[in-house]
Each structure stands twice: as C-alpha cells, then as structure tokens.
Amino acid sequence: EWTAANVVDDLVASVREQIGDARVICGLSGGVDSSVAAALVQRAVGNQLTCVFVDHGLLRSGEAEQVEQDFVAATGVDLVVVDAKERFLTALAGVSDPEEKRKIIGREFIRVFEQAARDVVGSHAGSDDHPVEFLVQGTLYPDVVESGGGTGTANIKSHHNVGGLPDDLQFKLVEPLRLLFKDEVRQVGLELGVPEAIVWRQPFPGPGLGIRIVGEVTGERLDILRAADLIAREELTAAGLDRSIWQCPVVLLGDVRSVGVQGDGRTYGHPIVLRPVSSEDAMTADWTRVPYEVLAKISTRITNEVREVNRVVLDITSKPPGTIEWE
Ligand code: XMP
C-alpha cells in the first residue's frame, strides 16, 4: 500500500544502507526537491549530513529565513550558510543581457558551492572522522527519465543548470527521490515535517529574481521587486489561489519609467508586471484569469506601499509565444 509513511520507512532504510558510516553533503536551494531529499537523508543518517545553502541574494522575501530558520528547526539538519550576496551583486553589475545574467549566476553559484563543499570535506578529513563520500541530489523520476536513466557520480544538476564538479571533488550520488513524482515528494515532505511553505512552494527559477528584473540587477531594484512580490504573494494567498495558479512571476521593468501622479506630485517610476500562469508542466501555459478584485487589491497595495512603483500591469500572453519568465 502506498502511504507516505511506508515510503519514508523504505527510503530511510535504503539511504542508511547506501551511506553506512560515511559523511554526506547536500546543497539546499529553498525548493521542494532539495529540501525533501535533505530531510530524508537527515532522518536516515542524522548529523552525518551537512547541508550547504548559498544565499545569492536573489531569493524572495522570507525565503532565506525559511531555509535557515524554519527548515533547520523542523528537521535538525546541520546547515552551513554562505552569504554570497555581495559577490553576486558585484558579478552582475552593469549586466542587462538575460543569457549573460544566467551564465554569471550559474558560474558564481558553482564556485561558491564548490568552495563550501571543499571546506566541509576539509573539516571532516581527519583520521578520527569519516570522510565525505556522498552528495545528495533531489532528482525526481521525470528528471531520471529525461536524462536517460543512469545514475552517475557527482554533478550538481539540481540548482541552476550548473556543470560538473572539479575532478578533486568526486562524490557518489544519493538520489532518494529518483522514483517519485512531484506530488509524492510533497507527501513525503509533509510526512517528514518539512514546513508547508517549502512543501507547497510554487516553481521558482534557480537564478531567482536576477531574471525578473529587466535591465541591470542592483541592490535597490532587488529591494523594490521583493517588496512588490511579497504583496502579490500575500494577496494571491489570501484569495485562496495558491493551488490553482502554477506560479506568478512578478517582474520589475528596471529600465522603463513612466509618468504618474501621487498626492499633488508627478512621479516618474517603474512598472511592475504580474505574470500569473496556469500550467501542468511549464512546457505550455495560459495566463490565469485572476479575479479583478484581487488584481485591484494587489495594484493598490503595490503602488501605495512601494514608493518607486507607480504602475502595475498584467501580462496576458500564453506560452507559447511568451515564456513564463521574462528573461
Ligand atoms: P520559461 O520561462 O522557460 O520557464 O517558460 C519554464 C519553467 O522553468 C522555470 N525556470 C527555471 N528553473 N532554472 C530553474 O531552475 C532556470 O534557469 C529557470 N528558468 C526558468 C520557470 O520558473 C518556469 O517554471
């Protein structure tokens, strides 16, 4: 009989058998898959697991805290947080091209993660400690099918399209979710006590808010976007739409300004785009017919509460021809 409890028992047993006394590391992104995989391995081998969270500063409001506080409190994982916010901002300075941004974010991510992995490995290389042999990946069944089925050694695929690890960092992979579909992963996550905000999180791209600012990514623009995004999420959640909307990117048009009026003053601010979509698998999507009252509330709140934004627009394009993300 398929129950989340039975699946957890079976997976815990097989992870324990695979890992034995060795040590294992896992990169956390804040997403469902890596979180559930880490929680499962933690359940199996306790503090033989060390998790690494690279905070690239491109997450939405509250998401880093969800990992650093809520997830740790719920699962007891040993977590290393790398604050790389300044490093990513510096690397992204002056860059507007979407592909260029993705490349930079992917490259910086792998460099920072590698260094953190080296530090963890180094700290467990002593003679009285077991070496770090394994890397946890949140690979799901659809990923396995897509990539031809084989399991290999060590490359980090779960985050943003990053390449392999260098030769001196070779790990065996632990992929406890590789026979599960997304809905099963969520059930397993709930069974393991992973916070609901993580278990039910909608898809969010690895490069994060870096590809939701059209134009250069700056600290100030990130703050504006985070504030607007939080309001949109709060109102969509309050309206009970979280499960019916696949995801709703909120995009800041950083290089566009338009004239507005607030109080007695003329403003010259940035537009925010709402991109709510309905989809089964993100390959195709339709724009979601969010009720007007909900849109009105979001628009009023964003323009009242986020000073730099004087216009909110709705993206009514399907995919194709529009992609879900703007970059
Ligand atoms: P597009 O914009 O191509 O997005 O219609 C399809 C789905 O993929 C997500 N997405 C990404 N996820 N790394 C990710 O992990 C990325 O670089 C990336 N780009 C897009 C997007 O949010 C949507 O769910």
Image (cartoon, rainbow, N blue to C red):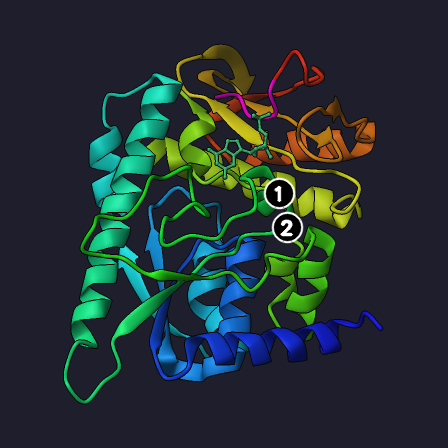
Residue type highlighted by circle 1 = Val
Q: Does residue 253 sit above or below 29 in this rendering? A: above
Q: Is residue 217 visible?
A: no
User: Who's the residue at 53% across and 80% down the image?
Assistant: 43
Which class describes the residues within 10 Å of circle 1: few (<14), some (14-19), or many (20+)? Answer: few
Tell me where residue 187 sits by quadrant. bottom right
Q: Is residue 310 left or right of residue 196?
A: left
Numbered range of the magenta stretch: 323-327
Residue 60 percent location from the top left of the image: 48, 45
Circle on res. 132:
none
Q: Is residue 130 left or right of residue 66?
A: left
Q: Quadrant of ligand 1?
A: top right
The answer to the question of whether label 2 and label 1 lie on touching residues, with beta carbons closer than 8 A, is: yes
Total marks in image:
2
Q: Is most of the magenta stretch helix, strand or loop?
A: loop
Circle on res. 145:
1
Residue 149 percent location from the top left of the image: 56, 46
Residue found at the very far bottom of the displayed protein = 128
Residue type highlighted by circle 2 = Tyr
Circle on res. 141:
2
Q: Secondary structure at mark 2?
A: helix
Tell me where residue 142 sits by quadrant. top right
Which class describes the residues within 10 Å of circle 2: few (<14), some (14-19), or many (20+)? Answer: some
Using the image as rendered, state which of residue 101 and residue 157 is in the foreground: 157
Using the image as rendered, state which of residue 260 and residue 159 is in the foreground: 159
User: Who's the residue at 77% across and 47% down the image?
Assistant: 243
Quadrant, the N terminus? bottom right
